[in-house]
Image: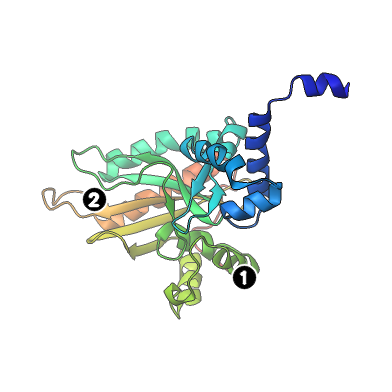
Amino acid sequence: MAEEIDRYRAPALDKGLDILEVLAAAEDSLSQAEICRALGRSPNEIYRMLDRLVRRNYVRRTPEDRYALTLKLFELAHAREPLKRLINQALPLMRQFAMTSEQACHIVVYDRNALVVVAQVDSPSYWNVSLRVGSRMDLVNTGSGHVFLAYAEPGERALMLAKRDSVSESDVPADFDARLDRVRKQGFENMESAQVVAVSNLSAPIFGPLGSVIAVMTCPYAARLDRPDAPSPDQTLELLLETARTLSANLSASPTSPRKDSE
């Protein structure tokens, strides 16, 4: 039997799978040297395979020249459930929101220490403020990140912050916990964008069947100077919250999930 298995060996495939398994088992990103040590191989043996995995988007290379898995394997493994179900349920509601609010919107999930955009819909007008699907964002300086952190238990919140891709205590405001508590109590985040001038991030939680936040819907709101009759920020926020509540209900979350935390 062993001879039969050896006859059909595919060394290159085995090497690639070994790299993926090492990265999947790691709590953080790994350098090429660390991958080599874990596999007992030389850099020359894995360099080309690692490069192909990066080019095929199974592995991402960080600015610090380290390597980590992307969401691609997750997406393949969950081609139908639950990620595909989330996206399929979300897109019609997102399109309706975009048409009514005249704003773009996107949905993010939390994956391996960062936020990942998994769905995005443009506004119906000729201009747009949007994020590409697959974009990765930080937890601290985004509305989506604030919502995820706000609904996390204290221990989980501390772990999420400690395991960020770019950990820097200096970029966490002194009153950050108080802000997150406020986000949870009011049931949404409304903050000026830390990346784009004159844009406000409106973010609402999407609850899963067990009542936990499984995703966040965000609208990067930009005022329409050419359309004074376009929905205001407050009106857009209400539309966003209603869309998030409907999506949560469709995903079998409690239909009575509170907008505000009553605790």
Say which quadrant the C terminus sits in.
bottom right
Query: Which residue is more in the foreground, 140 or 24?
Result: 24
Secondary structure beneath label 2? loop
Secondary structure beneath label 1? helix
Q: Report the residue at 50% width, 63% height from top.
A: 260
- Give the x, y percent position of residue 193: 31, 61
Is residue 91 visible in the rendered image? The answer is yes
Name which residue type carries label 2.
Pro
Name which residue type carries label 1.
Pro
Q: Residues within 10 Å of mark 1 (few under 14, many from 20)?
A: few
Q: CA distance from mark 2 to mark 1?
A: 36 Å
Q: Report the residue at 62% width, 70% height from top.
A: 154
Task: Determine which residue is flagged by label 2.
Answer: 231
- Give the x, y percent position of residue 238: 36, 53
> Taking 104 as reference, is 69 left or right?
right
- Quadrant in the picture for residue 262: bottom right
Say which quadrant the N terminus sits in.
top right
Task: Determine which residue is flagged by label 1.
Answer: 154
- Give the x, y percent position of residue 103: 27, 46
> Taking 19 as reference, is 145 left or right?
left
Q: Residues within 10 Å of mark 2 (few under 14, many from 20)?
A: some
> Taking 196 as reference, is 226 left or right?
left
Q: Report the residue at 20% width, 39% height from top.
A: 125
